[in-house]
Image (tube, rainbow, N blue to C red):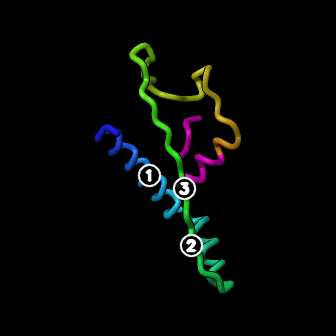
Amino acid sequence: MNPDLKMLVQEFERAINESVCESDRIASIVTDMKRAGYDITLVLEATIGVSARTDSEPVPSHVGASDSDFELTDQDYKFLRALKIAPDA
């Protein structure tokens, strides 16, 4: 893997980890489970697929609700909220 791409993938992994660690909801549930007498071990596994674009593919300047080829589903919004990301409305 090219070093620049490797660095970006590592940054992505750190961002996901930080989002999970900083989640108030997750912290609350972990606290409740510990109070109930349980220890918690969380292992998340993610597969990140990366492929190079061809020169003919345009680089998007932004992705938003006005893009006709792109729509977020309710599940997308739920996932983004869990990561504390607010998509432009």
**Percent x, y of residue 81:** 60, 50
- Tag shown at residue 13: 1
Residue type at the position of mark 1:
Glu
Residue extent of the magenta highlight: 78-89
Image x and y of residue 85, in percent: 53, 47
Which residue is depicted at the point 49% across and 63% down? 22
Distance in Å between CA atoms under marks 3 and 1 = 10 Å
Quadrant occupied by the N terminus:
top left
Image coords of residue 12 (percent x, y) = 43, 47
- Is the Cβ of the residue at disc 3 closer than 8 Å to that at disc 2? no
* Apparent side of residue 58 relative to residue 84 in the rendered image (left or right): left
Q: Which residue is mark 2?
A: 41
Quarter assignment of residue 23: bottom right
**Front-most of residues 31 and 7:** 7
Identified at 61% across, 65% down, the residue is 25
The tag on residue 33 is none
Amino acid type, label 3: Glu
Residue density around tag 1, few if under 14, some if 14–19, many if 20 or more, within 10 Å: some
Query: Do the residues bearing badges 2 and 1 touch, measured as CB atoms within 8 Å?
Result: no
Q: Which residue is under mark 3? A: 45
Inspect the image, locate mark 2, and give the three-letter code of the amino acid beneath it: Thr
Q: Are marks 3 and 1 in contact (CB under 8 Å)?
A: no
Circle nearer the viewer, 3 or 1: 3
For the point 43% across and 13% down, which residue is it? 56
Q: Secondary structure at mark 1?
A: helix
Q: Earlier in the sequence, mark 2 or mark 1?
A: 1
Towards the viewer: 80 or 34: 34
Q: Please say whether residue 28 is one of the residues in the magenta stretch.
A: no
